[in-house]
Amino acid sequence: MKNLIANSMLAVSLALWSLGSAAQTKEKSEGGNLKPSDKERFFNQSGYSPYAGRNYSTRPLWGEQHLHTSWSGDAIAAGTSVGPDEALSYAQGAEITSSSGQQVKLSRPYDWMVVTDHSDALGVMTGVLAGNPELMEDPVLKKWHEAMNAGGEKASAVVMEIITLQGQGKLPSAMSDKEVQLDMWQKMTEIVESHNDPGHFSAMIGYEWTSNYGGGNNLHRNVIYRDGKALADQVRPYTTFEFDSDIPNHLWDWMAMYEEETGGKVLAIPHNGNLSNGLMFATETPDGEPIDEEWVKQRQRWEPLYEVSQSKGTSEQHPSLAPTDEFADFEIWDKGNLNVVPKEPGMIEYEYAREALKRGLALEDEFGTNPFKFGLVGSTDNHTGISSAEENNYFGKFPSSEPGPERSTGNAFDFEGRTVKDWKLGASGLTAVWAQENTRESIWDAMKRKEVYGTTGTRMMVRFFGGWDFEESDTVGRNLGAVGYGKGVPMGADLPAAPEASSAPSFLVAAMKDPDSGNLDRIQIVKGWLDENGNTREQIYDVVWAGDREPGEDGKVPMIGSTVDVEKASWTNSIGASELITVWSDPDFDASQSAFYYARVVEIPTPRWTAYDAAYFEDANFSDDVPMTVTERAYTSPIWYSASN
């Protein structure tokens, strides 16, 4: 049933396992499946070396697609001093000084990063902090200047006021000057360009479009460019107040305009559906207009990815919507929206990725297009200029939540007494991209075709292929990429039409642990489908796991246990596996029912950042309800099956 390779020589195994991974051919650079001639290349390579002439990646490229620096108004108002230049240097492995004066460095450099400062008032608040005379003519900005320089609670209050006024479209007019915005944008792209080093580190251009529709309902999108400065500078980024819009389909119109005018390419990544109070995956627009055929086509075109995990919670699935999913209750934020306005009944089902993926199948049945056909990524959304997704190196969301004993009792958000504690923040997440080369263009192309996966901060390596004739013998060799692409399609793709003799799709799935993190507990495949009555359904299958555990009567594999010593913030990898790999075939497949499949890979428990704080700071005072362990995981982009094929 399962093929488990445990406790291997990890370094040697990693090198061998990665050699055949992530095939990326030139014919495939814009998405889609491999052609027959491509498949023949994998199995008819001339000469002795199976790697000679190959045109595919040897490893996933790790990066951050959602980070704010001092150029974001709310970040600098909160005391962030780290700008985009320092943030990009840090991503490449440099040691920098945080806003609270502490030294910080990544355990391992990233391969790429996108600084996504808010397009609204981009960089303007640096002038407010400095007391720019023209800006000080506005009484609101003058008040903010004084509060920001006072620091502490007064500065924090400015952040809350910015979020509130921005959501109401009432930010001071001095912050919405078009010429100032374009000038600041061109300065930003110049900084990003200076860090771009094709083949070694990709500094990608982007920004966050920050719709807080209705006051704190999070409809944010990160706009990611395939292009460099020459094209990106030609069009001013889209904003949400004064002269632009906070309706997502209007952003899509801007994206179409940008591509038409410049010849460039952009995509958008929505995030924090869990803070949208039911709007992120609703079947009407935020202003109450019903969606139509044009809307579903536009959303599928412009939004190929969704941010499933970040510091403000994980939004794969809510436990109330999947009560039998023992891994659904993970880093959940469900009190309200960004202003902590409480949720009303029925909102949650329109906020989580798995529900949207299922709803997308139903909408495709209705409109002929699936608007929620997205891949899954992770990121931090930190507002410190510091991307920190590791539990033992977590530097918080704002400077007030950087390491220190006070964050054990502090508030991450506080709106008129409605609070969310700092300890609710998660050290999450990261995005892995299977790109042919480390360039902006190749990384963007992989994002566009959804050949990506998101993690909660771990850098485990994951491969996921679907097809019709994978077999157990495919797990024995080390050239997984050639086998996976040669016989099927990768994560993010559509299964081809089934051969007549095939009874069910099969999936080749493999994972290897992060050398700096916990061993692997299990790999699960999550399936969603439309039943014969048009209702959406889901099922989770444990397909391969560590150790000699046996499924219970309910079919579930028991929990693996824990080796965490909370007091010492330590654990041992004496349980779990360094590598898991198997071929799984859907035992409940019905060719008449459209479906999607994605892999969820779960680590053994390890210490959460709160445990590291408790062990490091003598004055830390966490309450008894604060979690001290975490089960890191990865979520692959789905593979879709269409009954119409």
Image (cartoon, grey):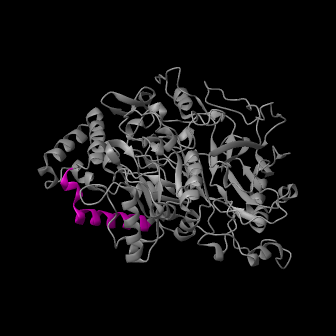
Tell which of 535 and 414 is nearer to you: 535
The stretch of residues the image draws in magenta is: 172-194
Q: Position of residue 404 (x, y in %)?
A: 44, 32
**Vertical side of 251 occupied by 565: above or below:** above
Tell which of 282 and 263 is nearer to you: 282
Q: Quadrant of the C terminus?
A: bottom right
Q: Position of residue 435 (x, y in %)?
A: 61, 65
What secondary structure do most residues of the magenta stretch adopt? Answer: helix
The outermost residue toward the front is 533
The outermost residue toward the right is 473
Q: At x 38% / y 36%, what residue is drawn?
A: 400
Q: Quadrant of the N terminus?
A: top right
Q: Is residue 368 magenta?
A: no
- In the rendered structure, the answer to whether residue 145 lies left or right of residue 562 reads left
Q: Say if residue 256 shows up in the picture.
A: yes
Q: Position of residue 25 (x, y in %)?
A: 67, 73
